[in-house]
Amino acid sequence: MSLHLAPLQEAWLAEIGVDAQWLARLRPASIADGQPREVEAPRPSAVPPPAVAVETVPAPAVRAPRAPEPRRVRPEAPKAPATVADVSGLDDLPAVADRIRECEVCALHVGRSHAVPGAGCEQAPEYLIVGEMPGVEDDLAGEPFQGAVGVLLRAMLASAGVAEDRVFMTNVIRCRPAGGRSPSADEVASCLPYLQRQISILRPQRILALGRLAAQALLGSRASLAGLRGHEQHYRTADGADIPVWVTHHPASLLLRPSYKAEAWRDLMAMVSVHN
Ligand code: URA
C-alpha cells in the first residue's frame, strides 16, 4: 500500500510507533476490506489435565466468622433538582454563544475568566468535536482547545485526514471548574442544553466525543469508555435527526498515557472510513 502522508500526520504516526508499512497491519480488517475480522475460537487442549491427588487433611479449628455489622444508612436529604440552562428562543449559533457567555445558571460562572461557547466551521460541519470542559488556556482565551491538549487533538485529526475547516469544536461544560476538577452531575445537567441546542443548529454529519464524560453526557449513557468506544453510537436531536457518534480517548488522557494513542488512532480511522 503506498501512502502519502503530510508532515503532521507523519509526526503523529511516528509518535505512536506506526510507520507507513505498519498502517495496513494496524488497520482493523473491517476497515481494510469491509469484512469483520474472525476471531479463532480457542482449540480444546489435546493433553488431558494432570490428575490431582486429593489428600484428606483434618480441618484446622476455625473460628466462625463474625457476622458483618449492619450498615447504618443515613437518610438522604432530598436533593434539589439541577437548574438547567434555558435555550428557548435560541435559533442560531451566535445567540447560543451570547447566552453561554452571560450564563449564571450554576456556580461555575463565579470562577471563570471566560465562558467557552465553541468555535470552528458553523455551516453544516462534517465533524462536531465534543470535549469535556475548557482548559486553563481556553478559560483565558474564551476559545476551546488552545493548550497542549488542543495541539495533540489537531495532530490526531490531521493524521486521520480530517481538515480543521470542516470541524466545529465545543464542550459539555462551558466554564472551567476551579483547579480543573471534574464537574458534578448537576453541573453537567445544567450545561447540557447548550450542547444539545448547538447540535440541532449545526447538524454535523458526525460527532466525535472525547472521553467518558463527553460520551456519557451526549449519549445519556452510564456505560464505560471501553464500552462506548469502537463502534458507531447515535445521537438523536430534539426534532428526530439521527447523527452518528464516535467515542475515543480524551487527548488529555493520551498525554498522560501515550500507550492509548494507537487505540485513539484506530477509533479515528474507523470513524472516517465508515463514512467515506
Ligand atoms: N480544552 C477544551 O476545550 N476541552 C477539553 O475537553 C480539554 C481542553
Image (spheres, rainbow, N blue to C red):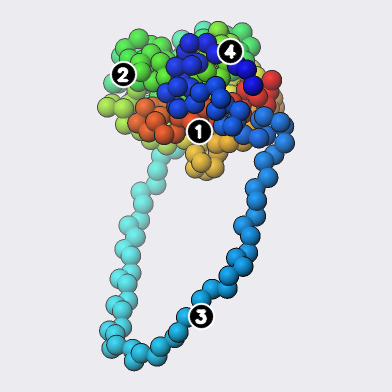
Residue at image location 42% in from the left, 23% down from the top: 15
- Mark earlier in primary sequence (1, 4): 4
State how far apart marks 1 and 2 are (Cα). 27 Å
State how far apart marks 2 and 3 are (Cα). 63 Å
Q: Name the residue under label 3.
A: 51
Instruction: Give the residue type at disc 4.
Output: His
Task: Give me the disc on residue 42.
Answer: none
Q: Mark 1 points at which residue?
A: 263
Camera-side residue of 146 and 203 = 146
- Mark earlier in primary sequence (1, 2): 2
Q: Mark 2 points at which residue?
A: 136
- Mark earlier in primary sequence (4, 2): 4
Q: How crowded is mark 4: few (under 14 residues within 10 Å), some or many (20 or more)?
A: few
- Mark earlier in primary sequence (3, 1): 3
Residue 2: image location, x then y, percent? 62, 17
Q: Do the residues labelled 3 and 4 touch (CB within 8 Å)?
A: no
Q: In which quarter of the image is the C terminus?
A: top right
Residue at image location 62% in from the left, 57% down from the top: 42
Q: Residues within 10 Å of mark 3 (few under 14, many from 20)?
A: few
Q: For marks 3 and 1, give the one nearer the viewer.
A: 3
Residue at disc 1, CB closer than 8 Å to ligand 1: no
Q: Name the residue under label 4.
A: 4
Q: For marks 1 and 2, give the one nearer the viewer.
A: 1
Instruction: Give the residue type at disc 3.
Output: Ala
Q: Are marks 1 and 4 in contact (CB under 8 Å)?
A: no
Secondary structure, mark 3, is: loop
Residue at disc 3, CB closer than 8 Å to ligand 1: no
Secondary structure, mark 1, is: helix
State how far apart marks 4 and 2 are (Cα). 36 Å
Left or right: where does residue 62 sit relative to residue 207? Answer: left
